Amino acid sequence: MVERGPEVLIRYGALRGSAKDGVAAFLGVPYAQAPVGPLRFRAPEPVEPWDGVREATAFGATAPKRPYAPPLDALLPDPDIAGDDCLNLNVWAPWDAPDRPGGTDGGPGEGGRPVMVWIHGGSLVHGSSAVPVYDGTAFARDGVVLVSVNYRLGIEGFGVFPDAPCNLGLRDQIAALTWVRDSIAAFGGDPERVTVFGESAGAISIAALLASPLAKGLFRRAVVQSGAPIAQPLDRARRTTEAVAARLKVPATADAFARVDRDRLLAAQTEVTGKGSPLTGGHSFQIVVDGEVVPRDPAEALADGASAEVDLLMGTTTEEYRLWFVPSGVTDRVGPVVQRLLLWRTKVPSRTARVYRAGRPQEKPGEVLGALATDKLLRIPLNDLADARLRSGGRLGTDARAGTYLYEFGWRSPVLGLGACHALELGFVFDTLDLPETRALAGPDAPRDLAAAMHAAWVSFAATGDPGWRRWDPARPVMTFGPGLPSLVEAPREAERRAWDA
Protein backbone atom coordinates (compact mmCIF):
# COMPACT_ATOMS: atom_id res chain seq x y z
CA MET A 1 0.00 0.00 0.00
CA VAL A 2 1.34 3.45 -0.94
CA GLU A 3 1.31 5.78 2.04
CA ARG A 4 -0.20 9.19 1.63
CA GLY A 5 1.75 12.26 2.62
CA PRO A 6 0.78 14.59 5.48
CA GLU A 7 -2.33 16.66 4.93
CA VAL A 8 -3.52 20.02 6.26
CA LEU A 9 -6.71 21.98 5.75
CA ILE A 10 -6.50 25.74 5.22
CA ARG A 11 -9.21 28.21 4.24
CA TYR A 12 -8.61 27.64 0.52
CA GLY A 13 -8.71 23.84 0.63
CA ALA A 14 -6.74 20.73 1.59
CA LEU A 15 -3.01 20.29 0.90
CA ARG A 16 -0.95 17.12 0.76
CA GLY A 17 2.79 17.38 1.24
CA SER A 18 5.62 14.99 2.06
CA ALA A 19 7.37 14.06 5.30
CA LYS A 20 10.77 12.72 6.25
CA ASP A 21 12.61 12.40 9.57
CA GLY A 22 10.08 14.43 11.52
CA VAL A 23 9.79 17.29 9.01
CA ALA A 24 6.87 17.90 6.67
CA ALA A 25 7.24 19.95 3.50
CA PHE A 26 4.40 21.57 1.57
CA LEU A 27 5.82 23.04 -1.63
CA GLY A 28 4.44 25.28 -4.36
CA VAL A 29 1.42 26.44 -2.36
CA PRO A 30 -0.35 29.39 -4.04
CA TYR A 31 -0.88 32.48 -1.90
CA ALA A 32 -2.35 34.61 -4.70
CA GLN A 33 -3.79 34.07 -8.15
CA ALA A 34 -1.48 33.72 -11.14
CA PRO A 35 -0.50 37.22 -12.35
CA VAL A 36 -1.47 36.63 -15.98
CA GLY A 37 -4.10 37.99 -18.35
CA PRO A 38 -6.05 40.82 -16.71
CA LEU A 39 -4.11 40.26 -13.44
CA ARG A 40 -0.73 40.97 -15.01
CA PHE A 41 0.72 44.27 -13.73
CA ARG A 42 -2.01 44.33 -11.07
CA ALA A 43 -1.94 43.94 -7.30
CA PRO A 44 -2.11 40.31 -6.15
CA GLU A 45 -5.59 38.81 -5.84
CA PRO A 46 -6.51 36.17 -3.22
CA VAL A 47 -6.39 32.51 -4.22
CA GLU A 48 -9.59 30.90 -5.41
CA PRO A 49 -10.56 27.94 -3.16
CA TRP A 50 -10.11 24.49 -4.68
CA ASP A 51 -11.95 21.19 -4.33
CA GLY A 52 -10.34 17.97 -3.23
CA VAL A 53 -6.76 17.65 -2.03
CA ARG A 54 -4.05 19.71 -3.76
CA GLU A 55 -0.68 18.03 -4.12
CA ALA A 56 2.13 20.14 -2.64
CA THR A 57 5.21 18.00 -3.18
CA ALA A 58 7.16 20.01 -5.78
CA PHE A 59 8.35 23.60 -6.01
CA GLY A 60 5.99 25.87 -7.88
CA ALA A 61 6.75 28.09 -10.84
CA THR A 62 9.39 30.76 -10.39
CA ALA A 63 8.85 34.36 -11.42
CA PRO A 64 9.97 35.16 -15.00
CA LYS A 65 13.70 35.91 -14.97
CA ARG A 66 16.99 35.41 -16.76
CA PRO A 67 19.91 33.44 -15.27
CA TYR A 68 22.89 35.18 -13.71
CA ALA A 69 25.59 36.09 -16.19
CA PRO A 70 28.89 34.19 -15.98
CA PRO A 71 30.76 33.71 -13.73
CA LEU A 72 28.04 34.33 -11.12
CA ASP A 73 25.83 31.65 -12.65
CA ALA A 74 28.23 28.99 -11.35
CA LEU A 75 28.40 30.54 -7.87
CA LEU A 76 24.71 31.35 -7.37
CA PRO A 77 22.51 28.50 -8.66
CA ASP A 78 19.10 29.88 -9.64
CA PRO A 79 16.50 27.28 -10.74
CA ASP A 80 14.01 28.31 -13.40
CA ILE A 81 10.66 26.50 -13.12
CA ALA A 82 8.14 27.19 -15.86
CA GLY A 83 4.51 28.08 -15.20
CA ASP A 84 2.16 30.97 -14.58
CA ASP A 85 1.43 30.37 -10.88
CA CYS A 86 4.61 32.05 -9.66
CA LEU A 87 2.96 33.60 -6.58
CA ASN A 88 3.56 30.58 -4.40
CA LEU A 89 5.33 29.65 -1.19
CA ASN A 90 6.74 26.65 0.63
CA VAL A 91 6.28 25.50 4.22
CA TRP A 92 8.57 23.24 6.24
CA ALA A 93 7.17 22.27 9.65
CA PRO A 94 8.02 19.94 12.54
CA TRP A 95 5.81 16.88 12.10
CA ASP A 96 5.06 14.14 14.57
CA ALA A 97 5.54 10.55 13.45
CA PRO A 98 2.35 8.52 12.92
CA ASP A 99 0.93 7.61 16.30
CA ARG A 100 -0.37 4.20 15.33
CA PRO A 101 0.80 1.20 13.27
CA GLY A 102 -0.09 1.77 9.64
CA GLY A 103 -0.70 5.47 10.23
CA THR A 104 -0.21 7.72 7.22
CA ASP A 105 0.60 11.25 8.17
CA GLY A 106 0.99 12.08 11.85
CA GLY A 107 0.46 15.75 12.60
CA PRO A 108 2.11 19.10 13.31
CA GLY A 109 2.36 18.36 17.02
CA GLU A 110 2.18 21.18 19.50
CA GLY A 111 0.88 24.48 18.20
CA GLY A 112 2.29 27.92 18.64
CA ARG A 113 5.73 27.35 17.13
CA PRO A 114 7.77 30.35 15.97
CA VAL A 115 7.45 31.12 12.26
CA MET A 116 10.16 32.43 9.94
CA VAL A 117 9.33 33.81 6.48
CA TRP A 118 12.22 33.95 4.01
CA ILE A 119 12.37 36.61 1.27
CA HIS A 120 15.10 35.81 -1.23
CA GLY A 121 17.56 38.23 -2.80
CA GLY A 122 18.78 38.65 -6.35
CA SER A 123 18.77 42.38 -7.17
CA LEU A 124 14.99 42.15 -7.69
CA VAL A 125 15.63 40.37 -11.01
CA HIS A 126 17.00 36.96 -9.94
CA GLY A 127 16.33 34.30 -7.32
CA SER A 128 13.43 32.23 -6.06
CA SER A 129 12.33 30.14 -3.09
CA ALA A 130 13.44 27.01 -4.99
CA VAL A 131 17.14 27.78 -4.56
CA PRO A 132 18.46 24.63 -2.80
CA VAL A 133 20.50 26.64 -0.26
CA TYR A 134 17.19 27.90 1.17
CA ASP A 135 15.92 24.45 2.12
CA GLY A 136 13.95 24.84 5.36
CA THR A 137 14.53 21.36 6.80
CA ALA A 138 17.08 22.46 9.43
CA PHE A 139 14.78 25.19 10.74
CA ALA A 140 11.87 22.75 11.05
CA ARG A 141 14.19 20.21 12.68
CA ASP A 142 14.89 22.84 15.34
CA GLY A 143 11.26 23.71 16.04
CA VAL A 144 10.57 26.55 13.58
CA VAL A 145 7.90 26.63 10.90
CA LEU A 146 9.81 27.94 7.88
CA VAL A 147 8.07 29.65 4.96
CA SER A 148 9.85 30.75 1.76
CA VAL A 149 8.21 33.02 -0.77
CA ASN A 150 8.29 33.79 -4.49
CA TYR A 151 7.39 37.27 -5.70
CA ARG A 152 7.36 39.07 -9.04
CA LEU A 153 10.72 40.32 -10.30
CA GLY A 154 12.10 42.84 -12.75
CA ILE A 155 9.77 44.95 -14.83
CA GLU A 156 6.73 42.87 -13.82
CA GLY A 157 7.45 43.32 -10.12
CA PHE A 158 9.12 46.71 -9.91
CA GLY A 159 8.37 48.62 -13.10
CA VAL A 160 6.90 52.11 -12.74
CA PHE A 161 3.89 52.77 -14.96
CA PRO A 162 1.17 55.43 -15.12
CA ASP A 163 -1.53 52.76 -15.47
CA ALA A 164 -0.49 50.18 -12.84
CA PRO A 165 0.30 50.08 -9.12
CA CYS A 166 3.95 50.42 -8.05
CA ASN A 167 5.94 47.97 -5.97
CA LEU A 168 4.01 44.92 -7.17
CA GLY A 169 6.75 42.59 -5.92
CA LEU A 170 6.52 44.18 -2.49
CA ARG A 171 2.73 43.87 -2.60
CA ASP A 172 3.23 40.17 -3.36
CA GLN A 173 5.36 39.82 -0.23
CA ILE A 174 2.64 41.50 1.84
CA ALA A 175 0.06 39.13 0.35
CA ALA A 176 2.26 36.17 1.32
CA LEU A 177 2.60 37.49 4.88
CA THR A 178 -1.17 37.90 5.01
CA TRP A 179 -1.50 34.26 3.93
CA VAL A 180 0.88 33.30 6.75
CA ARG A 181 -1.19 35.22 9.28
CA ASP A 182 -4.38 33.48 8.15
CA SER A 183 -3.10 29.95 7.46
CA ILE A 184 0.08 29.13 9.35
CA ALA A 185 -1.69 27.75 12.44
CA ALA A 186 -2.69 24.72 10.35
CA PHE A 187 1.01 23.86 10.15
CA GLY A 188 1.59 24.33 13.89
CA GLY A 189 2.87 27.90 13.59
CA ASP A 190 1.98 30.87 15.79
CA PRO A 191 0.77 33.82 13.65
CA GLU A 192 1.70 36.13 16.53
CA ARG A 193 5.35 35.03 16.43
CA VAL A 194 6.38 35.66 12.83
CA THR A 195 9.93 36.67 11.94
CA VAL A 196 10.56 37.90 8.42
CA PHE A 197 14.14 37.51 7.18
CA GLY A 198 15.94 38.08 3.92
CA GLU A 199 19.26 38.84 2.26
CA SER A 200 20.39 41.46 -0.25
CA ALA A 201 17.30 42.58 -2.21
CA GLY A 202 15.27 40.50 0.25
CA ALA A 203 16.73 42.53 3.11
CA ILE A 204 16.03 45.78 1.28
CA SER A 205 12.46 44.55 0.86
CA ILE A 206 12.20 43.88 4.59
CA ALA A 207 13.43 47.38 5.39
CA ALA A 208 10.63 48.69 3.17
CA LEU A 209 8.12 46.38 4.89
CA LEU A 210 9.25 47.75 8.25
CA ALA A 211 8.34 51.22 6.97
CA SER A 212 5.10 50.19 5.24
CA PRO A 213 1.72 50.75 6.88
CA LEU A 214 0.33 47.89 4.76
CA ALA A 215 2.63 45.41 6.52
CA LYS A 216 1.89 46.66 10.02
CA GLY A 217 1.23 43.80 12.42
CA LEU A 218 2.15 41.03 9.98
CA PHE A 219 5.44 40.22 11.72
CA ARG A 220 6.96 40.65 15.15
CA ARG A 221 10.65 40.37 14.35
CA ALA A 222 12.89 40.98 11.34
CA VAL A 223 16.35 39.95 10.16
CA VAL A 224 18.09 42.16 7.60
CA GLN A 225 21.09 40.43 5.98
CA SER A 226 23.38 42.45 3.71
CA GLY A 227 20.79 45.01 2.68
CA ALA A 228 19.96 48.52 3.88
CA PRO A 229 16.86 50.77 3.92
CA ILE A 230 16.69 52.31 0.47
CA ALA A 231 14.03 53.31 -2.05
CA GLN A 232 14.02 55.54 -5.10
CA PRO A 233 11.75 58.48 -5.88
CA LEU A 234 9.19 57.70 -8.56
CA ASP A 235 10.73 59.95 -11.19
CA ARG A 236 14.15 58.34 -10.91
CA ALA A 237 12.81 54.77 -10.84
CA ARG A 238 10.64 55.49 -13.88
CA ARG A 239 13.79 55.99 -15.99
CA THR A 240 14.51 52.26 -15.99
CA THR A 241 11.00 51.47 -17.20
CA GLU A 242 11.33 54.12 -19.90
CA ALA A 243 14.70 52.73 -20.99
CA VAL A 244 13.21 49.25 -21.38
CA ALA A 245 10.26 50.74 -23.29
CA ALA A 246 12.65 52.54 -25.63
CA ARG A 247 14.53 49.29 -26.23
CA LEU A 248 11.23 47.56 -27.07
CA LYS A 249 9.92 50.55 -29.06
CA VAL A 250 6.63 50.58 -27.15
CA PRO A 251 4.98 53.17 -24.85
CA ALA A 252 6.10 53.03 -21.19
CA THR A 253 2.71 51.75 -20.02
CA ALA A 254 1.66 48.51 -18.38
CA ASP A 255 -0.92 47.99 -21.13
CA ALA A 256 1.79 48.15 -23.81
CA PHE A 257 4.20 45.94 -21.87
CA ALA A 258 1.49 43.31 -21.34
CA ARG A 259 1.32 42.87 -25.11
CA VAL A 260 5.04 42.16 -25.45
CA ASP A 261 6.31 38.59 -25.69
CA ARG A 262 7.79 37.71 -22.28
CA ASP A 263 11.10 36.42 -23.62
CA ARG A 264 11.57 39.64 -25.56
CA LEU A 265 10.67 41.62 -22.45
CA LEU A 266 13.22 39.75 -20.32
CA ALA A 267 15.89 40.24 -22.96
CA ALA A 268 15.25 44.00 -23.07
CA GLN A 269 15.34 44.43 -19.29
CA THR A 270 18.60 42.45 -19.12
CA GLU A 271 20.17 44.65 -21.80
CA VAL A 272 19.10 47.81 -19.97
CA THR A 273 20.13 46.78 -16.46
CA GLY A 274 23.09 44.48 -17.20
CA LYS A 275 25.77 47.14 -16.80
CA GLY A 276 24.39 48.89 -13.73
CA SER A 277 25.95 48.48 -10.29
CA PRO A 278 25.30 49.85 -6.80
CA LEU A 279 28.67 51.62 -6.89
CA THR A 280 28.70 53.20 -10.34
CA GLY A 281 24.95 53.58 -10.82
CA GLY A 282 23.10 52.81 -14.04
CA HIS A 283 19.64 51.41 -14.62
CA SER A 284 18.28 48.94 -12.07
CA PHE A 285 14.98 47.93 -10.52
CA GLN A 286 14.35 49.37 -7.09
CA ILE A 287 11.63 49.68 -4.49
CA VAL A 288 10.02 53.10 -4.96
CA VAL A 289 8.48 55.68 -2.67
CA ASP A 290 4.93 55.44 -4.01
CA GLY A 291 2.94 57.14 -1.27
CA GLU A 292 1.01 53.97 -0.47
CA VAL A 293 3.02 50.80 0.08
CA VAL A 294 6.11 52.89 0.83
CA PRO A 295 4.85 56.34 1.86
CA ARG A 296 8.32 57.82 2.46
CA ASP A 297 11.99 56.95 2.31
CA PRO A 298 12.43 53.82 4.50
CA ALA A 299 15.68 55.05 6.05
CA GLU A 300 14.01 58.26 7.19
CA ALA A 301 10.87 56.47 8.41
CA LEU A 302 12.84 53.93 10.43
CA ALA A 303 15.11 56.62 11.88
CA ASP A 304 11.97 58.44 13.02
CA GLY A 305 10.71 55.37 14.88
CA ALA A 306 8.73 53.30 12.37
CA SER A 307 8.50 49.68 13.60
CA ALA A 308 10.25 50.59 16.84
CA GLU A 309 8.26 47.76 18.42
CA VAL A 310 9.78 45.14 16.08
CA ASP A 311 12.87 43.23 17.25
CA LEU A 312 15.59 43.67 14.65
CA LEU A 313 18.70 41.61 13.85
CA MET A 314 20.90 42.92 11.04
CA GLY A 315 24.39 42.75 9.66
CA THR A 316 26.75 42.13 6.76
CA THR A 317 29.61 39.98 5.63
CA THR A 318 33.05 41.51 6.13
CA GLU A 319 33.95 41.61 2.44
CA GLU A 320 30.62 41.97 0.65
CA TYR A 321 32.24 43.49 -2.42
CA ARG A 322 34.34 40.45 -3.30
CA LEU A 323 31.42 38.59 -4.92
CA TRP A 324 31.36 41.22 -7.68
CA PHE A 325 34.91 42.57 -7.68
CA VAL A 326 36.93 39.34 -7.63
CA PRO A 327 35.29 37.19 -10.37
CA SER A 328 35.11 40.22 -12.67
CA GLY A 329 38.76 41.17 -12.05
CA VAL A 330 37.97 44.63 -10.64
CA THR A 331 40.27 44.13 -7.65
CA ASP A 332 43.21 43.69 -10.02
CA ARG A 333 42.26 46.23 -12.69
CA VAL A 334 41.62 49.22 -10.42
CA GLY A 335 44.73 51.28 -9.80
CA PRO A 336 45.16 54.42 -7.68
CA VAL A 337 43.98 56.79 -10.43
CA VAL A 338 40.81 54.83 -11.25
CA GLN A 339 40.16 54.35 -7.55
CA ARG A 340 40.22 58.10 -6.94
CA LEU A 341 37.97 58.73 -9.96
CA LEU A 342 35.37 56.22 -8.77
CA LEU A 343 35.47 57.59 -5.22
CA TRP A 344 34.91 61.09 -6.59
CA ARG A 345 32.02 59.90 -8.76
CA THR A 346 30.37 58.15 -5.82
CA LYS A 347 30.91 61.12 -3.49
CA VAL A 348 33.12 59.36 -0.97
CA PRO A 349 34.85 62.08 1.11
CA SER A 350 38.59 62.24 0.49
CA ARG A 351 39.31 62.25 4.23
CA THR A 352 37.33 58.98 4.53
CA ALA A 353 39.33 57.38 1.73
CA ARG A 354 42.57 58.42 3.42
CA VAL A 355 41.61 56.63 6.63
CA TYR A 356 40.87 53.41 4.74
CA ARG A 357 44.11 53.58 2.75
CA ALA A 358 46.14 54.21 5.89
CA GLY A 359 44.52 51.30 7.73
CA ARG A 360 44.93 48.85 4.82
CA PRO A 361 48.52 49.37 3.57
CA GLN A 362 48.85 45.83 2.18
CA GLU A 363 45.60 45.89 0.17
CA LYS A 364 45.28 46.66 -3.52
CA PRO A 365 43.50 49.89 -4.57
CA GLY A 366 40.59 47.75 -5.81
CA GLU A 367 40.28 46.06 -2.41
CA VAL A 368 40.32 49.39 -0.57
CA LEU A 369 37.66 50.61 -3.01
CA GLY A 370 35.60 47.51 -2.23
CA ALA A 371 35.88 48.04 1.51
CA LEU A 372 34.70 51.63 1.08
CA ALA A 373 31.80 50.46 -1.11
CA THR A 374 30.78 47.77 1.42
CA ASP A 375 30.67 50.28 4.24
CA LYS A 376 29.05 53.10 2.29
CA LEU A 377 26.24 50.91 0.95
CA LEU A 378 25.68 48.55 3.88
CA ARG A 379 27.63 48.74 7.14
CA ILE A 380 27.28 52.47 7.76
CA PRO A 381 23.52 52.63 7.01
CA LEU A 382 22.87 49.65 9.32
CA ASN A 383 24.99 51.18 12.08
CA ASP A 384 23.10 54.44 11.65
CA LEU A 385 19.77 52.61 11.92
CA ALA A 386 20.90 50.80 15.07
CA ASP A 387 21.95 54.14 16.59
CA ALA A 388 18.60 55.72 15.66
CA ARG A 389 16.69 52.85 17.29
CA LEU A 390 18.88 53.21 20.38
CA ARG A 391 18.01 56.91 20.61
CA SER A 392 14.34 56.08 20.13
CA GLY A 393 14.55 53.46 22.86
CA GLY A 394 16.09 55.99 25.18
CA ARG A 395 13.02 58.16 24.75
CA LEU A 396 10.68 55.23 25.31
CA GLY A 397 12.57 53.68 28.21
CA THR A 398 14.70 50.53 28.22
CA ASP A 399 11.84 48.14 28.93
CA ALA A 400 9.64 49.57 26.19
CA ARG A 401 12.02 49.36 23.24
CA ALA A 402 12.43 46.34 21.03
CA GLY A 403 15.83 44.69 20.77
CA THR A 404 18.38 45.65 18.12
CA TYR A 405 21.27 43.29 17.42
CA LEU A 406 24.14 43.48 14.95
CA TYR A 407 26.33 40.73 13.50
CA GLU A 408 29.15 40.40 11.00
CA PHE A 409 30.06 37.27 9.05
CA GLY A 410 33.82 37.02 8.58
CA TRP A 411 34.68 33.45 7.60
CA ARG A 412 36.52 33.54 4.27
CA SER A 413 35.66 31.18 1.42
CA PRO A 414 38.64 29.65 -0.42
CA VAL A 415 36.68 29.48 -3.68
CA LEU A 416 38.25 31.81 -6.27
CA GLY A 417 39.59 34.01 -3.47
CA LEU A 418 36.07 35.23 -2.70
CA GLY A 419 36.77 35.66 1.01
CA ALA A 420 33.90 36.76 3.26
CA CYS A 421 31.81 37.82 0.28
CA HIS A 422 28.18 38.73 -0.25
CA ALA A 423 25.75 35.78 0.15
CA LEU A 424 28.36 33.49 1.74
CA GLU A 425 26.53 33.40 5.07
CA LEU A 426 23.37 31.88 3.57
CA GLY A 427 24.49 28.26 3.77
CA PHE A 428 25.45 28.87 7.40
CA VAL A 429 22.12 30.47 8.34
CA PHE A 430 20.14 27.65 6.70
CA ASP A 431 22.63 24.99 7.85
CA THR A 432 22.86 23.60 4.31
CA LEU A 433 26.66 23.35 3.95
CA ASP A 434 26.49 19.80 2.58
CA LEU A 435 24.54 20.76 -0.53
CA PRO A 436 26.49 21.04 -3.80
CA GLU A 437 24.86 24.42 -4.43
CA THR A 438 26.24 25.74 -1.12
CA ARG A 439 29.68 24.28 -1.78
CA ALA A 440 29.82 26.19 -5.07
CA LEU A 441 30.36 29.35 -3.02
CA ALA A 442 31.72 28.07 0.30
CA GLY A 443 33.83 25.11 -0.80
CA PRO A 444 33.75 21.57 0.65
CA ASP A 445 35.33 22.27 4.03
CA ALA A 446 33.26 25.11 5.48
CA PRO A 447 33.17 24.87 9.30
CA ARG A 448 30.04 23.09 10.47
CA ASP A 449 30.41 24.36 14.03
CA LEU A 450 30.16 27.92 12.74
CA ALA A 451 27.05 27.02 10.75
CA ALA A 452 25.53 25.40 13.83
CA ALA A 453 26.19 28.54 15.88
CA MET A 454 24.83 30.96 13.30
CA HIS A 455 21.76 28.85 12.57
CA ALA A 456 21.07 28.48 16.31
CA ALA A 457 21.26 32.27 16.75
CA TRP A 458 18.61 32.80 14.06
CA VAL A 459 16.38 30.13 15.64
CA SER A 460 16.80 31.72 19.07
CA PHE A 461 15.96 35.17 17.71
CA ALA A 462 12.78 33.87 16.08
CA ALA A 463 11.73 32.06 19.24
CA THR A 464 12.61 34.67 21.87
CA GLY A 465 13.72 37.91 20.23
CA ASP A 466 17.25 37.36 21.57
CA PRO A 467 19.92 35.78 19.31
CA GLY A 468 22.22 35.16 22.25
CA TRP A 469 24.34 38.27 22.60
CA ARG A 470 24.10 41.79 24.01
CA ARG A 471 21.69 44.13 22.33
CA TRP A 472 22.98 47.30 20.70
CA ASP A 473 24.27 49.90 23.14
CA PRO A 474 26.75 52.83 23.06
CA ALA A 475 29.67 50.39 23.11
CA ARG A 476 28.51 49.10 19.68
CA PRO A 477 28.59 45.30 20.27
CA VAL A 478 28.75 43.17 17.11
CA MET A 479 28.67 39.38 17.11
CA THR A 480 31.30 38.20 14.65
CA PHE A 481 30.86 34.78 13.04
CA GLY A 482 34.36 33.86 11.93
CA PRO A 483 37.04 33.68 10.86
CA GLY A 484 37.39 31.77 14.13
CA LEU A 485 34.78 30.94 16.74
CA PRO A 486 31.89 33.38 17.21
CA SER A 487 32.88 36.26 19.45
CA LEU A 488 31.39 39.57 20.55
CA VAL A 489 33.47 42.53 19.41
CA GLU A 490 32.84 46.09 20.49
CA ALA A 491 33.05 48.75 17.77
CA PRO A 492 34.95 46.82 15.08
CA ARG A 493 36.98 49.03 12.72
CA GLU A 494 35.77 52.09 14.57
CA ALA A 495 38.26 54.48 12.97
CA GLU A 496 36.86 53.65 9.55
CA ARG A 497 33.27 54.01 10.73
CA ARG A 498 33.98 57.39 12.31
CA ALA A 499 35.61 58.56 9.09
CA TRP A 500 32.13 58.73 7.55
CA ASP A 501 30.84 61.17 10.16
CA ALA A 502 30.22 64.66 8.81
Image (cartoon, grey):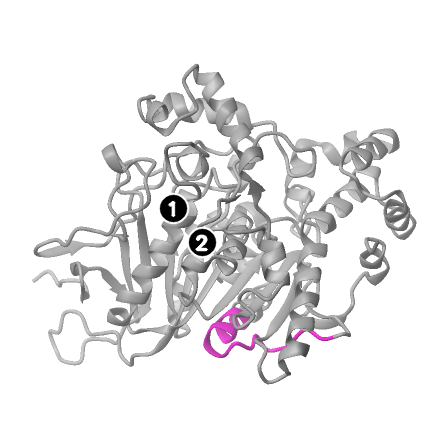
Amino acid type, callout 2: Ile
Circle 2: element type? strand
- Could you say which quadrant of the image residue 42 lies in? top left
Residue furthest toward the bottom? 399
| Residue depicted at 48% across the width and 57% down the height | 212
Residue 498, can we see it?
yes
Residue at (71, 32) in percent of width and height: 329
The x, y position of residue 343, in whole percent, is 81, 37
Q: Which residue is mark 1?
A: 151
Q: Is residue 32 left or right of residue 436?
A: left
> Which residue bears the numbered disc 2?
119
For mark 1, give the secondary structure: loop
Measured along the vertical axis of the image, is residue 309 above or below residue 38? below
Tag 1: amino acid: Tyr
Q: Residue at x 18, y 63 (%)?
A: 11
**Is residue 369 toward the left or the right of residue 448 in the image?**
right
For the C terminus, the image quarter is bottom right
Q: Nearer the viewer, residue 37 or 495?
A: 37
Q: Position of residue 395 (x, y in %)?
A: 66, 77
Q: Which tag, 1 or 2, sits closer to the chain's start? A: 2
Per the rendered image, the range of residues in magenta is 456-473
Q: Tell me, yes or no, whether the two marked residues, 1 and 2, touch with CB atoms within 8 Å.
A: yes
